[in-house]
Image: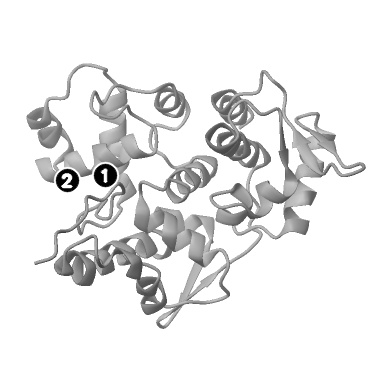
Amino acid sequence: MKEKKAMKNKIQSFNGFKIYFDQISAIFKDKQSSDEKIDYDKLTEKTGLNKRKVKILLSYLCDIGFNKKISLKNTELGKLIFSYDPYLENMGTLWLIHYLSASNTYLLVWNRVFSYASIKGAFNREDLIAIFTDLQDNISENTYKKHLRKEIGIVLDAYINQRLSKLGLLEQEDEIYHPIRNQDIPILILLASIIRFRDVYYKGASAIGINEICEAENSPGRLFFLDESFLRTKLEVMKSKGLIGIESRADLDQVRLGSDMTFEGVLERYYKSL
């Protein structure tokens, strides 16, 4: 029997459970209310969820940066969102959760599904299965044939039937899914996502090429399904508000970000503007 290689990414983020945001927000609120060590028995009693589901949702909150991994301590991002949107209902919060999930290469299925969807006009589930054929030698046959399909279905369901459907990024017609482009993302949430992209892939950079923001792997333009012309219009709005600089001369075509501009700082500015 061929030995399977250890995976560096997570295939089963939700282990068959659908992504119900009332459950996620219940765990989020309780954890953010205290930074003490988790008492799983009390948390299961308070939320009405079983211990396995609680652990799965806490792990997801860690994966998107609302809590620290291993220690589960609250992060600055988690504290910020909790102070303004503890129920995770605001549209800006939902756009942010989408970007933090879809751009996270550790959340392998979520990341690949949206990277693929960003360049397609339409697709079905079998098309999505085909983008994971490289995993066959690294995971068990059962995981590949059963659990992978289920995880793909859970991610799609989050955007068709659950709270992320409010973003309007995917529509379903029979067995076909259609990516919907150029949704009206709040300017400051888009800017925060650009800063996040900068921090992950261009750490310390004061400028990023507009082409990278539009089309690079895991970029906001790609994962928000934004056409270049639409995104450039949004960037011009940011420039007119004094949020960014745009350099388009000679061989330059880039966005310049202030050295004091942070991901959390822009997010807080967004929430305070509501």
* For the residues bearing labels 2 and 1, Cβ distance under 8 angstroms: yes
**Residue 73: assigned label:** none
Residue 95 is situated, as x and y percent measured from the top left of the image, at: 52, 46
Disc 2 packing (10 Å; few <14; some 14–19; many ≥20): some
Q: Amino acid at mark 1?
A: Gln
Vertically, is 247 above or below 159? above
Q: Residue furthest right?
A: 250
Which tag is nearer the camera, tag 2 or tag 1? 2
Disc 1 packing (10 Å; few <14; some 14–19; many ≥20): some
Vertically, is 131 above or below 62? below
Look at the image and tell me in which quarter the N terminus lies. bottom left
Residue 144 is situated, as x and y percent measured from the top left of the image, at: 23, 68
Q: Which color scheme is applied? A: one colour
**Residue 23: assigned label:** 1
> Residue drawn 36% across and 46% down?
106
Vertically, is 250 above or below 18? above
**The quarter of the displayed image where residue 186 is located:** top right
Secondary structure beneath label 1: helix
Question: What residue is disc 2 on?
Answer: 53
Q: Residue furthest front?
A: 2
| Residue 174 or residue 191, whichever sits in front | 191
Residue 245 is situated, as x and y percent measured from the top left of the image, at: 81, 32
> Residue drawn 64% across and 29% down?
273
Q: Amino acid at mark 2?
A: Lys
Would you say 97 lies left or right of 202 here? left
Look at the image and tell me in which quarter the C terminus lies. top right
| Residue 126 or residue 76, whichever sits in front | 126
> Residue drawn 45% across and 26% down?
77
**The quarter of the displayed image where residue 193 is located:** top right
> Residue drawn 40% across and 27% down?
78
